[in-house]
Amino acid sequence: MKDAGNIDLVVTDIVMPGTDGLALAARLRTEYAGLPIIFITGYADGRDLSGELLLSKPFDIAALARLVKAGLDREPPGSGRQGKPQAG
């Protein structure tokens, strides 16, 4: 993932073959602190996603656009640029 350059925002489904969006998010956030991630789900499976950007299926493009704007407008924890790889 280090060759991906700067990432401003990620959109991922929660349920995917071989992994899930939460595992992907955890992996990304180890390299990109404060990276905004929009989780898409068709299930209310009881996972605690409070504080996360969550989009429930079905959704329209306007709902996705609102969450993308909200994610990009967020101040990342500890400041520093969103999606900037951590040193080290």
Image (spheres, grey):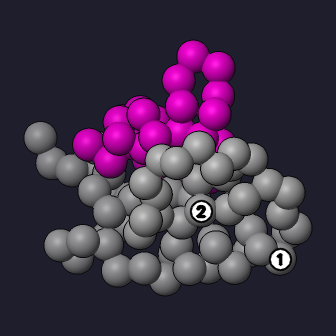
59 lies above or below 73: above
Magenta-tinted stretch: 1-30
Question: How far is disc 2 from disc 1 in space, using C-alphas?
Answer: 14 Å
Disc 1 is placed on an element classified as helix
Kindly identify the residue that appears in the image at 42 percent across and 34 percent down. Answer: 23
> For mark 2, what is the residue?
54
* 15 relative position to 75: left or right: right
- In percent of width and height, residue 26 lies at 35, 41
Q: What residue type is labelled 1?
A: Ala
Which callout, 2 or 1, points at the residue further toward the start of the chain?
2
Dots 2, 1 in contact, CB < 8 A = no
Mark 2 crowdedness (10 Å alpha carbons): few <14, some 14-19, many ≥20: some
Kindly identify the residue that appears in the image at 46 percent across and 57 percent down. Answer: 49
Magenta highlight on residue 81 = no
Image quarter of the C terminus: top left
65 lies above or below 8: below
| Mark seen at residue 4 | none
Kindly identify the residue that appears in the image at 59 percent across and 43 percent down. Answer: 45
Q: What residue type is labelled 2?
A: Leu
Frontmost of labels 2 and 1 is 2
Magenta highlight on residue 20 = yes
The residue at the far top in this view is 18
The residue at the far front in this view is 46
* 68 relative position to 8: left or right: right
> For mark 1, what is the residue?
62
- In percent of width and height, residue 86 lies at 21, 50
Frontmost residue, 6 versus 43: 43
The quadrant in which residue 57 appears is: bottom right
The residue at the far left in this view is 88
